[in-house]
Image (cartoon, rainbow, N blue to C red):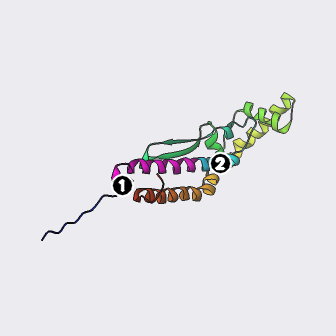
């Protein structure tokens, strides 16, 4: 008597060699959605000074691949960190403050603008600046949605690897 057992391997990404591509695609999509969402939460919280350079400097980048992906939302403008975290007392340069005084406060007389700028700089030299925490607040507002993006990616990966999801 002969007993034959036959099993056919399913034609799914888990067995056909395309599983890494499936995982990479889903994680890329989740990371991209996450950094764009966080950037969208952060940008409106960035204070707009005279030139809006700080707000315009918020950027997003993704490096790595698959499970080594790293998403970053950052601002390369030199004064982003002191605005985010505040600063200890220091005497800042008068020029940028004078420009701010002219544009924001509408003081057109150069001498008066520099005088007001000096008073502002002197105050900063005594007490520093308060933190704005635009990144921290934006991250707190958006992190739950980012977790959801990755939970959904995990579900899609499982479905696609089992052959129950889309290609």
Q: Is residue 25 magenta?
A: yes
Pointer 1 or 2: first along the chain: 1
Foreground pick, 87 / 159: 159
Neighbor class of circle 1 (other Cα within 10 Å; few <14, some 14-19, many 20+) is few
Residue drawn at (84%, 28%) of the image: 110
The reply, left or right, for residue 32 in relation to residue 119 is: left
Regarding mark 2 in the picture, which secondary structure is present there?
helix
Query: Can you identify the residue that label 2 sits on?
Result: 40
Which numbered circle lies on residue 67? none
Neighbor class of circle 2 (other Cα within 10 Å; few <14, some 14-19, many 20+) is some
Query: Can you identify the residue that label 1 sits on?
Result: 11
Image quarter where the N terminus lies is bottom left
Whether residue 88 is visible to the viewer of this picture, yes or no, is: no
Residue drawn at (73%, 32%) of the image: 96
Numbered disc in front, either 1 or 2:
1
Question: Magenta segment range?
Answer: 14-35
Q: Residue furthest bottom?
A: 1
x and y percentages locating residue 115 in the rendered image: 82, 33
Whether residue 21 is visible to the viewer of this picture, yes or no, is: yes
x and y percentages locating residue 164 in the rendered image: 45, 60
Residue drawn at (81%, 35%) of the image: 103
Q: Is residue 32 magenta?
A: yes
Regarding mark 1 in the picture, which secondary structure is present there?
loop
Mark 1–mark 2 Cα distance, whole angstroms, equals 40 Å
Residue drawn at (57%, 49%) of the image: 33
The reply, left or right, for residue 51 in relation to residue 35 is: right
Q: Quadrant of residue 91?
A: top right
Foreground pick, 128 / 12: 12
Q: Is residue 147 above or below residue 110?
A: below
Foreground pick, 69 / 11: 11
Q: Residue furthest left?
A: 1
Chief SS of the magenta region: helix
């Amino acid at each position: 008597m002969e007993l034959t057992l036959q099993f056919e391997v399913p034609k799914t990404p888990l067995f056909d060699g395309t599983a890494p591509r499936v995982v990479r695609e889903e994680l890329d999509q989740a990371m991209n959605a996450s950094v764009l969402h966080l950037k969208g939460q952060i940008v409106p919280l960035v204070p707009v000074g005279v030139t809006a350079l700080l707000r315009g400097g918020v950027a997003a980048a993704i490096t790595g691949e698959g499970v080594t992906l790293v998403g970053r939302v950052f601002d390369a403008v030199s004064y982003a960190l002191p605005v985010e975290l505040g600063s200890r007392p220091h005497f800042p340069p008068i020029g940028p403050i004078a420009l701010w005084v002219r544009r924001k406060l509408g003081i057109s007389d150069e001498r008066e603008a520099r005088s007001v700028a000096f008073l502002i700089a002197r105050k900063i030299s005594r007490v520093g600046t308060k933190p704005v925490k635009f990144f921290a607040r934006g991250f707190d507002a958006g992190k739950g949605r980012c977790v959801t993006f990755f939970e959904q990616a995990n579900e899609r990966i499982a479905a696609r690897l089992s052959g129950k999801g889309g290609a």
